[in-house]
Image: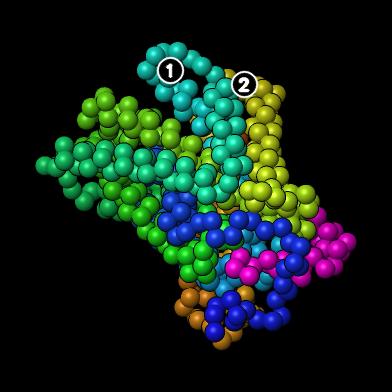
Amino acid sequence: MSDAASVPFSETKAPESAERLHRGALGLVDISASTMANIGPAYSFYFGFAGIVLAAGLGSPLVIIVAIVAIALLGNTLSQFSRAHPSTGGFITFVGKTFGGTSAVTTALVAGAGYIIAISSVLVISGGFLSMMIQYYTNVNIPWIIFSAIFTAGAMFMMFRGVAVSTKLAGFFFGFEFLVLLVVAIAALIKHGGHLSGVPFQPSHVLNGFSGLGLAFPLAIYIFIGWENSAALAEETTNPRRNVPRAVFLSIALMAATYLLVSYATVSGFGYNVTALTSAAIPFISVAHSIGPWLAFIAYTAGLTSTLGVLIAAVNSQCRLIFNAGREGLLPRWIGKVDPVRRTPVNAIITFVAIAGAITLVWALGHWIGGSGNSLNALNFFFESSTMGTILILFVYLAANVALPFYYRKYRPAEFSIIKHVVLPALGVVAIAIPIYYLFKPGQPDPYNWFPWVGLGLIVVSVVYSIWLVRRDPGLGDRVGSIIADE
């Protein structure tokens, strides 16, 4: 008996008229490459690691090890759900199937808001990075918004053409950045080979001890955001029950090894000088420049292609979450329409990018009205919007971990495992609770100090709206997860 045949009869099936994506267009390599392109190791590491070292100093690689454990626990949760119920809806479907329609709509709104806010940081930094690169090498200042608009339009064009074409392009960008990261890291280790030590992995060298680890931990989690990309591509993947879990763990493992290598090489490249390390704007670029200015230029180029890869891969996967919510009736149904020829979720792509662009505009107006218009640079936008988006996404991760044991007890009791479905997701809850605590901890600088309250406000509004919608449409709960990827 196949996995698909073992799905309990009590789960509602999709109507024959349901909008479907291009099934079987992607293989294991495609979705793995797309997932790692979504993570964007160069883009994430360049900016994320700079914040990690400010909080944790020389012990930053140790913080990354702790984050790897947390992400691996989340990977187990996503893999277990995907084996049982592969769905383009991802966490929205998994939580909704477990706890009902109200939870599904709430998760759809919170996840959609979180990912859209986070992607606005990518829209900005894609143009901002090129603007910074041009200014660094030519001293010419070209507004980042021009490049951001061009890159966003180009990325949307590629996504409209089809998932296979855009995914392969994102995979190509990932391949280039991955090669550059390895070359620079290995070159740095060779250059400093006579002075290497285990200092970066010693707890005593984490700045301010456990407090420093706690402050750096949310940033270490952030540099892995995108690891869940493959789940949203389930419907377009061959054998999703097997390939999605494999892509999840393959991507996490390869990115974990990469981050450990480049973080150790970066700290070692500064000769374990914490003052110099924390003073660098982008520590990895500084290490590349110390090896050779030509290598720094290549590293800058890798950062640019990385942002473009993230832009394509992230919108590609995350817009499919709201697409699926649209076709199941959790969000307006017109979002859940596909192009009849290329089978791409055009409406969802346009909606996703348009709202992200509007968020950027509102963010800018907020700074001007608040009298801080001078801080309207790409890096400020990146740090603020990525933090706000991460807060909401972490709550979605938390809900998925809580849902896993209930789902298996409800739908697949014969497969229920104490280790896989109780112990590991419980540890995942603890792992996610830590960054949530530090993001909510009092004493954050403005505007970060009010981000948690905005997040809680969005969740409350989402719950209230969800209750109203489910009462208005009692059959909504039965439609959640009705479209299974391989059926």
**Disc 1 secondary structure class:** helix
Q: Please tell me whether residue 69 is drawn above or below residue 181 in the rendered image.
A: below
The mark lying in front, picked from 1 and 2, is: 1
Q: Position of residue 353 (x, y in %)?
A: 65, 38
At x 35%, y 48%, the residue is 259
Q: Please tell me whether residue 102 is drawn above or below residue 437 in the rendered image.
A: below
Evaluate whether residue 130 shows in this view: yes
Q: Report which residue position mark 2 lands on.
A: 373
CA separation in Å, label 1 and label 2: 20 Å
Q: Nearer the viewer, residue 42 or 350?
A: 350
Q: Position of residue 19 (x, y in %)?
A: 71, 58
- Identify which amino acid the numbered label 2 is placed on: Gly
Circle 1 crowding by C-alpha within 10 Å: few under 14, some 14–19, many from 20:
few
Q: Would residue 207 be counted in the magenta stretch?
A: no
At x 73%, y 53%, the residue is 336
Q: Please tell me whether residue 208 is drawn above or below residue 6 in the rendered image.
A: above
**Furthest residue in direction bottom, as rendered:** 414
Q: Please tell me whether residue 459 is drawn above or below residue 399 in the rendered image.
A: above
**Disc 2 secondary structure class:** helix
Rendered image quadrant of residue 194: top left
**Furthest residue in direction front, as rendered:** 341
**Furthest residue in direction left, as rendered:** 194
- Identify which amino acid the numbered label 1 is placed on: Gln
Range of magenta residues? 460-487
Res. 135 mark: 1
